[in-house]
Amino acid sequence: MDSDAIATTAPRWSLRLFDGWQLRCGDAAVVVAYRERRLLSLLALQGERPRAHLAGLLWPESEEGRAHGNLRAAVWRIQHLLDGVLEESQGMMALAPGVHVDVHDLRGVAHQVTAGQDPPDTARALQVLRRGTLLPGWYDDWALEEREQLHQLRLRALEALADRLLDHDELHGALQAAMGAVQLEPLRESAHRALIRVHLKDGNHVEAVRVYRAFKERLSEELGISVSHQIVDLIRPLQAVHPRNDLPPPDAVP
């Protein structure tokens, strides 16, 4: 067969930033040096950026000339060793459109859910939103900032997803979403309220009280503050059904 007749396709690249860094070409993991990993990660998180912006963020303590030299070296290696990963036009750099990035999946699901839309695949949405830490062990200022922004986005999305699934009586999914939010931020009251609402709707009063008591005690011990009236209002009706000394009476305040 004439070699010119053989169809060629660009390799499919995928970049993982959660639970450890990994670049794959098809099914094969690719070894990438730390300098190039930092550049690819920054572009994956922030999108298209000018060279000066990238050099300044990646090497903030270096002189401008050295920072730009480091960037040129990183770009050269990526372009020669990782064909089809990087694009550059008029001084602007970006990952190629065909590169799949796990962070983009999370942002897409999170923005969909927080906008009040139902995800087409609940199981996948939960899997995406409950992924691990972004770039664990990376302490660059830009990485820490991106990690915190994604952390807050995931929390809001998990709480919103729990509420939407609860409205649809999808209690198992709602429970997974609420538990995911609590695990991400154990001192976040809105996450515990979401979890309590799921238990109450499922008729699990004991679990609802257990979550309330544990959160109230932890908040007092670690921060020295009380729970809000919002979480008390969720638990208060149980006093009439299951009278207990540790449940708020009808006229209680936090």
Image (cartoon, rainbow, N blue to C red):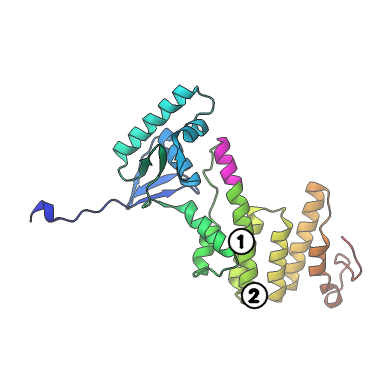
In magenta segment, residue 167: no
Q: Which residue occupies the foreground of this view, 29 or 11?
A: 11
Magenta region, residue range:
139-148
Above or below, 54 against 189 in this view is above
Left or right of 4, for residue 202: right
Residue at x 54% of width, y 39% of height: 137
Where residue 91 sits, quadrant-wise, is top left
Mark 2 element type: helix
**Which numbered disc flags the more N-terminal residue, 2 or 1?**
1
Q: Residue furthest right?
A: 251
On-image quarter of the C terminus: bottom right
x and y percent of residue 88 in the render?
37, 40
Task: Decide: few, some or many residues near mark 1? Use Cα within 10 Å; few <14, some 14-19, many ≥20.
Answer: many
Disc ID at residue 158: 1
Residue at x 60% of width, y 54% of height: 153
Q: Main secondary structure of the magenta part?
A: helix
The amino acid beneath tag 1 is Leu
Above or below, 248 against 52 in this view is below
Residues under numbered marks 2 and 1 in contact, where contact means CB atoms less than 8 Å apart: no
Task: Decide: few, some or many residues near mark 2? Use Cα within 10 Å; few <14, some 14-19, many ≥20.
Answer: few
Left or right of 150, for residue 201: right
In magenta segment, residue 147: yes
Left or right of 156, for residue 59: left
What separation in Å lies between label 2 and label 1 (alpha carbons)?
A: 14 Å
Residue that badge 2 annotates: 167
